[in-house]
Image: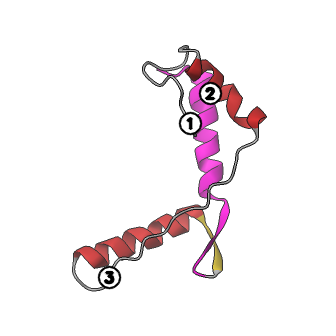
C-alpha cells in the first residue's frame, strides 16, 4: 500500500490532470469534460444510435522531479506491493 504522503501526491496529480486543458475536436476542453463526452458517445454507440469515435490523449512527458517523489518509493518496493517499475 502507498503511504499517506504518496496517496496525497497521486490524488493531487490526478485532480490537476482532470482540470488540465486538451485539444479535442478542434477546441480546448478540460480532461474531465473529454472523458464525459467520450462516455456519452460510448453509451450512444452501445444503444446503436451512432458509431463510436475513439479519442487518444497526447502523451506529455512529466518533469522528472514531479514524478520521482512517487515513483522512487514504488520502484524500490517501499510504496506498494507488486508495482515495481511503475510508469505514470
Query: Dot 3, crowdedness within 10 Å: few (<14), some or many (≥20)?
Result: few
Q: Is residue 73 above or below residue 41?
A: above
Based on the picture, tell me whether residue 51 belongs to the magenta stretch.
Answer: no
Residue positioned 62% across, 27% down in the render: 71
Q: Nearer the viewer, residue 71 or 12?
A: 71
Based on the picture, tell me whether residue 5 belongs to the magenta stretch.
Answer: yes
Say left or right for 25 vs 28: left
SS class, disc 3: loop
Mark 1 in CB contact with mark 2 (< 8 angstroms): yes
SS class, disc 1: loop
Residue bearing mark 1: 87
The answer for how far apart the CA atoms under marks 3 and 2 are is 39 Å
Mark 1 in CB contact with mark 3 (< 8 angstroms): no
Query: Dot 1, crowdedness within 10 Å: few (<14), some or many (≥20)?
Result: few
Mark positioned earlier in the residue sequence (1 or 2): 2
Mark positioned earlier in the residue sequence (1 or 3): 3
The answer for how far apart the CA atoms under marks 1 and 2 are is 8 Å
Q: Give the magenta part as a residue range.
A: 1-25
Q: Which corner quadrant holds the C terminus?
A: top right
Locate residue 63, reporting x and y percent: 76, 41
Residue bearing mark 2: 71
Residue 5 image label: none
Residue bearing mark 3: 51
In this view, which residue lies farthest toward the left? 47
Mark positioned earlier in the residue sequence (3 or 2): 3
Residue positioned 56% across, 29% down in the render: 7
SS class, disc 2: helix
Locate residue 53, reporting x and y percent: 41, 76
Mark 3 in CB contact with mark 2 (< 8 angstroms): no
Locate residue 33, reporting x and y percent: 54, 68
Amino acid at each position: 500500500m502507498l503511504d499517506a504522503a504518496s496517496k496525497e501526491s497521486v490524488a493531487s496529480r490526478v485532480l490537476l490532470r482532470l482540470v488540465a486543458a486538451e485539444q479535442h475536436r478542434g477546441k480546448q476542453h478540460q480532461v474531465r469534460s473529454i472523458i464525459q463526452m467520450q462516455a456519452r458517445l460510448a453509451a450512444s454507440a452501445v444503444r446503436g444510435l451512432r458509431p463510436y469515435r475513439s479519442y487518444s490523449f497526447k502523451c506529455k512527458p512529466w518533469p522528472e522531479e514531479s514524478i520521482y517523489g512517487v515513483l522512487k518509493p514504488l520502484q524500490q518496493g517501499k510504496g506498494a506491493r507488486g508495482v515495481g517499475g511503475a510508469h505514470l
